[in-house]
Each structure stands twice: as C-alpha cells, then as structure tokens.
Amino acid sequence: MKQVKIITAQEAALLVKDNDVVTTNGFVGSGQPEALTSALEARFLETGAPKDLTLIYAASQGNTDGRGGDHFAHEGMLKKAILGHWNAVTALQKLVNENKIQAYNLPQGTLAQYFRDVAAHRLGTITHVGLETFADPRITGGKLNAVTKDDFVKVIEIEGHEQLFYPRMDMNIAFIRGTYADEWGNVVMTKEVSPFDATPIAQAVHNSGGIVVIQVEKIVKGGTLDPKLVKVPGIYVDYIVQCDDPAKHQQSFDCAYDPSLTGEATVPVKALEPASLNAKKVIARRAALLLLNMSSEAVINLGIGIPELVSSVANEEGIGDTLTMTVEAGAIGGIPLGGVQFGASVNAECYLDQAVQFDFYDGGGLDLTCLGLAECDADGNINVSKFGTRIAGCGGFVNITQNTKNVVFCGTFTTGKLKEEIKDGKLHILQEGKVQKFVPTVDHITFSGTYARNHNQHVLYITERAVFEMKEDGVHLIEIAPGIDLQKDVLDQMGFKPIVDDVKRMPAYLFEDKPMGLKEMKNQIGK
C-alpha cells in the first residue's frame, strides 16, 4: 500500500511555484487549512516567493482579520483571484481596488461544480446560473476592476438555450483541511462542519497533474479509518501535514469544538426567547406568512441577518417543525448558525458536499428563500455584491435566487441611522435613514428582475413599511404599514416610482406585541 509522505507546513509551502494555480478548502471560519496558508504567506514575506499565483475557491474564506484567503493578500504574491465570496477578505479587496491584481467574483455554487468538471477533464462547466446578472460577460463577466480584461466566462447556445460556459483550467496545488489521515493518505472529515469541496478539489488537482496537500489534526495507522467515512482517498493525496498548533486547526475560528455541528452528538435545543418587536421582526413576520401555504415538507434557505429571524418567528408561532432548513455548505435540517460559524448547523440530518447541495438548489429544489435586500431598482434587480469599493461578493446568492420558486428579499426600507418605533399598532419613523435602498439603477446585478419574470418566479421585496411584488409589468407596491404616509414615507424615499394601483395595509397583527397565531391559521388552511 502507498505510504504518503508526511511533511511540515513549511515544507508544504516550498512546493508552490511561481505562476501556480492554487485552490484551498473551507467555508467562512470553518475548515480552514490555516497551517498551510499561513506558512505559504510566511515564505513569501521572507523570500519574495512564490510569485504571481492564481487563487481560486468557491465559498467565503476568512474573517476580515488576515486569516483565510487574506494570507494571499500581498502585492507580487498574487496575480489573479477567482472567488465566490469576497466580504471576509478585506486585504484582498484592497488589492482589487488599487488594481494590483486581476479579480473575478463568480457564483459560489458554479465554482463548486467547476471543480468536478476540472476533475473529469470536461471542456468546462455549462450552466444557466448567472445569465443576465453581473456574471454574464455581456454585463461584466464577474470582472471587478480595470486591470481584469479577459473573459473567464463565455455565452454559448445549446439546443436553442443560452448558457454560460466556464472553460476548464488546470490547477497545480490544493491545500485541504481534514480531521484525521492514515499513513496511506486516506482522509476523514469527522470533526469538520461539512465536507465542503474536499473530494472534487483533490480530484481536480490530482487529475491536473498537480500536488494535493492535506492538513490534519492527527495521523493514524494505515487501514484503521472507517472506509465509509473517507472523503479523500489516499490515491489523490501527495502529502500530509499534521498540525500541532491548535490555533491553526480550529473547527471554526476562535470557537471550541462542538460535536453537535458534525453529527457526533445531538444536543437539546433550548427554546429561544422571542425576539423583541421591532422593525426587523415585522419584516420577518411578514415573510413568515408565506409559510402558511407551504407543506410540512417545504425546504428553505435563509440568509444572514433579518432573514434569520424568519426561523425565530416560526418557532415562536409553533410552526418551526414545518421547516427543513438548508445551508450552502451542505447541511440539511437542523439549525443553521451565523457569523464566523456560518455554514455550520446544529443537529443536522445530513451533510452533503457543497457542489451536491448546489445541484439541488440549481434544479429548483428549494420551496422558499429569504435573503437580504441591499439595493433594488425599478426593474426589480437586486444588488448585494458590490458597492463602490466595498466588494461583498455574491456567494450562493445567484444560484439560490435564480432557481427558487418563491424568493423574498428582506431589509429595512432605508439605512444609515434609521430610527423607528412600533407603538399602538403603528410604525413611526423617528429619523429617516440617510441611504435609500430603492434606487434608479443598481450598481451590480446580483439578481435579475427580467430573468425572474421570464421564468415565472414569485418575488416579494419586504420592508418594515412597504411590501412590493414582482409582476409581469414591473415592481408593484402592494402593501404599506399602518401609521405610514404613502407619499412622504414611501414614494418620496425611493429613487424610482413603483407601480401603484391596489395598495393594502400590511396585516395589523404584524405590529402587535403578541404571537400572530400562525399555527391556528395554518391549521385552518389545512382543513
């Protein structure tokens, strides 16, 4: 049996050559191969090598503090970055804004699937995801600055259907994080919150003739690992690095190991205290009304922030058990976490590879998604990915919103020192926000209103004071909150005029500090 070489992180860093294409595994603060990437950074700072690397990864990797993808954020070290999400790598963003590197932002799910196509030596990845968004080369092709000239994505036509085509690019180095490896190179991920992209990344780099390096917590005797748990077999692996520094092998950044995030333990989930009644809860309550007409088998994806409150509202109303939550990293069921642990879920029922999860999303498997609302324009387009010099990146937003039957964008109507209160069943604007979210034209099309209309998606834009609906002829204002003046508080605070023909009041119970009675309403509908 093959004996895989065991080396140090510093020796692994020496394997990377000038102009290599490097890929890493991880998701926000979880599963990061910190020993490997920090050793590579240290080598560059000490020697000036390797130079002119290309970095490609699918999910967010980092925490805005120099870890994760920001280990590559040095002029001269990096030539090009192709990432699914940018918000956590502020040092890399700086290089982009200064035109020091070529940079692309492309849909996270498509990049995850791209690794599989590279592994299989297909011509590339062909997908409808991203059409009519910023990823479409007829708009920007995902390019983020002036020095990024080449189109990484092409438009092709197959059987009368337009598709986006990502040509195959060979990859030279993979830095992957696992939990245990045996001396034959077989790797399990039993303490990771997801398998992420470990298998397809290892296959892609191995089949490109590259080098696969795995960082693990411990190396064990060959043949002692459960073969059903092996995610990266030894035939793909060139080197193993045992990380003896706990700070560089945390389950998630600065978080103690939690077996309820890996399926090794199930923990009782205490009933959460209901959120206080405020504008954000009103938005979540209005979104939760969509659950009334969904079956107990509905499958849902919720974004970070206000959308997370939808689950809280459902639990408060006694219908939380009707939701099956999913997250892009691969978990099915359970309770998704946020912040640096976004991508992890407590008491999940299943953990899929990231690319497999996105296959389900791309095929329309979700019944409902609730995501953030940063900018919206007259065509119903949404921008959550780029605002001037701030490069948030799209993550899985494009895959999810373009393929889900019911799409809800949730956010306050304006932002920037907005102050509101709910009193006597009415919403009162104490201080208007300085920044309008409803603008004439969004800076970056992360969601295409035209595409949604052409594909018969049901789209709502829910704020605390107004609800809009996408219809065939554009964005309609359909509801306003009690206490709100249509002209002063809504129309005058928008950069475009919505279609106004049949405006109703948002339900009064949304603004009352007591349960809405969703369980009873759902039972009545079911009769």
Image (spheres, rainbow, N blue to C red):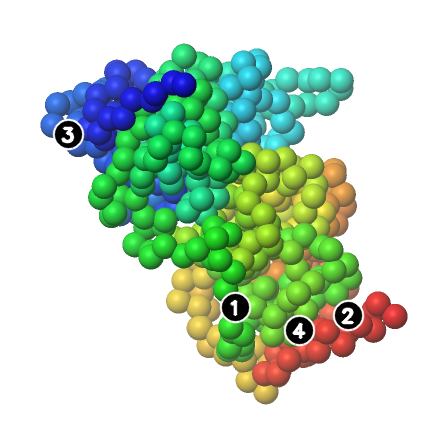
**Any mark on residue 268, and which?**
1
Given residues 153 and 501, the one toward you in this image is 153
The structure residue drawn at horizontal position 19% and vertical position 21%, both measured from the top left corner, is: 49
Given residues 395 and 120, the one toward you in this image is 120
Residue where numbered disc 3 is placed:
45
Name the quarter where the N terminus is drawn.
Answer: top left
Q: Nearer the viewer, mark 2 or mark 4?
A: 4
Q: Alpha-carbon distance for marks 2 and 1? A: 26 Å
The structure residue drawn at horizontal position 50% and vertical position 27%, both measured from the top left corner, is: 200
The structure residue drawn at horizontal position 26% and vertical position 43%, both measured from the top left corner, is: 248
Q: Is residue 182 left or right of residue 110?
A: left
Q: Alpha-carbon distance for marks 2 and 3? A: 61 Å
Amino acid at the residue labelled 2: Lys
Looking at the image, the residue that sits furthest to the left is: 46
Chain-order first, disc 1 or disc 4: 1
Q: Nearer the viewer, mark 1 or mark 4?
A: 1
Amino acid at the residue labelled 3: Leu
Question: Around disc 2, counting alpha carbons within 10 Å, would you say few (fewer than 14), some (14 to 19), or many (20 or more)?
Answer: some
* Contact between labelled residues 3 and 2, with CB atoms less than 8 Å apart: no
In the image, is residue 471 above or below residue 101? Answer: below
Q: Secondary structure at mark 3?
A: helix
Q: Position of residue 256 (x, y in %)?
A: 33, 57
**Any mark on residue 318, and which?**
4
* Contact between labelled residues 4 and 2, with CB atoms less than 8 Å apart: no
